[in-house]
Image: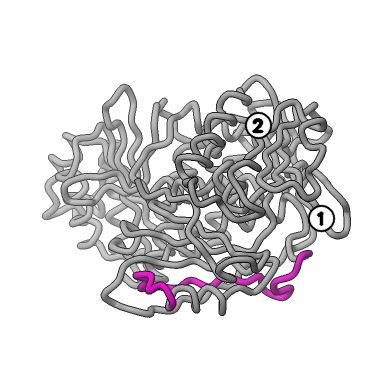
Amino acid sequence: MGGKEASRGFLYQAFASVLEALTAQTAWDKIYIEFPTSKDKVDIALEKEKQIIKSIQVKSTINSFSKSNIKAWLLELIEDVSSTKYELFLIGQCDKDTITFINSVKKYYDKDIDEKAKKSLAGFDTNILDENQIEIVNILFEINLLEKLVRDSLHKYISYRNKKMTYDQISFISSATVNDQMISSTQGKGIDRKVFDDELEKRILLLADGYSIQRTSIGIKSFNRGAEKLENETESCLSLLDKFDGRRLKNNHNWNEDIYQNLEEFLLNNTNKKHAYQIFLDTHSSVAFAAGRVLDNKSGIDIFPVQKTTTNGTILWDITRVPERKYSDWQFSHEKTNINRNDSAIILNVTRNIYGDVVDYIKDIELPIGRVINCTLNKVGATNISVEDGTHATILANSIYSALSDRNTAERRAILHIFASAPNAFMFFLGQNSLGFGKCILYEYDFEQRDSCSYSQSIDFTK
């Protein structure tokens, strides 16, 4: 399967899983994308009390589905895993015989078999229908239709909770929820029902009209310029100044042991699910990323970063509303530099174009990079005002997975090297979404031009 086809397949699986999660009639405890089985035929699985209660295979085509394919896929799905129910979720057009077969399966279960249905089912072992609950769903090959189905299902979900939201707000939550499912698929881990519901509830509350909340201020600093009084402005503050000489980590210190471990302990001890927070990040971009990773989207902590901006001063970058204007999006380019290497480097040119510096660094130290993924914002390029607000930063961070989806299985199992010139609030959001990246390593640039005048490795998430 090619890169575009694989990416499209992941997207359609995510759409299908969100639809299933929102509309499933049967109660479930956990939902999986790319559920691991011996024959790898189960794309989506619903689990209840440690038992698979529904197995779904998602198929998409730009041509037409054939009756023979449907029969074969049903048999493969049933043979692959024991489940209470089975479903084929077909995205694309079906030919006339296939449509008749699908309708005949429904008639069989309704005990309304006519001659046309008998003829269509001839040669198909109907014992399979007797012994299993099977459903075949067919939706046209149109991304707008799938998005509409998710929005409509989410609208119903929200209305049951007596909330009222705008079209833009529902669309934003739909996209973010689909993205969560895509990320979860890269690790083969399921999403608990409570986590799914809690995360939706959190987004609904954050975007609901008139929503406001008192936030506790916490801070992290690893350099002092502009953060001299941060301890007095926050309820709790972690200072890492003693670990650095300017922006350079001191020789006798380690990024993981002396920085990340202290950071993780501080954040876990100073946040909880009962309160909401705003976090000041006067620190290296790697620390901002790591903070988001600790307080990821599944942590249940209501927290947003405070960002220093050129035009609006220091403001909270939350997502309290979704404006109608269209934000600039990513433009991705992929370069295969060595087919014998599986590590990837992703370059995020947000506030400054760093592509040349990163490529020079990779060559200088001979990093084992096989693919370089260069990311730049379309239309606006790389400037200190390229990211407009918290909503924009969140959308950009969420959509980074799209840049990574072209990687093959070997590349996803290898290491992702992350190079970024971006606002710390964006890096925090990126860190919140990073568990789906797999093994990754961060890098810091010598901005003060005091040492290497290049990059150096910082926090390592490969173990």
- Residue extending furthest toward the top: 274
Label drawn at residue 166: none
Q: Is the residue 47 above or below the residue 135 in the image? A: above
- Residue extending furthest toward the front: 252
Q: Earlier in the sequence, mark 2 or mark 1?
A: 2
| Camera-side mark, 2 or 1 | 1
Whether residue 106 can be seen here: no
Q: Which of 117/458 is in front?
A: 458
Query: In what quadrant of the picture does the C terminus appear?
Result: top left
Whether residue 246 can be seen here: yes
Q: Position of residue 58 (x, y in %)?
A: 35, 53
Residue contact at pointers 2 and 1, CB within 8 angstroms: no
Seen in the image, is 324 located left or right of residue 31?
Answer: right
Q: Is residue 406 magenta?
A: no
Q: How far apart are marks 2 and 1 (CA)?
A: 22 Å
Q: Is the residue 410 above or below the residue 299 in the image? A: below
Q: What residue type is labelled 2?
A: Asp
Q: Position of residue 127 (x, y in %)?
A: 13, 40
Q: What element carries label 1?
A: strand
The residue at 62%/69% (across/down) is 349
Q: Say few, some or many: other residues with alpha carbon within 10 Å of mark 1 (under 14 / 14 to 19 / 20 or more).
A: some
The residue at 53%/55% (across/down) is 146
Q: Which of 112/160 is in front?
A: 160
Label drawn at residue 302: 2
Q: Where is residue 73 in the image (x, y as percent from the top left)?
A: 22, 55
Image quarter for residue 95?
bottom left
Q: What element carries label 2?
A: strand
Range of residues picked out in magenta: 364-385
**Which residue is labeled 1 in the image?**
309
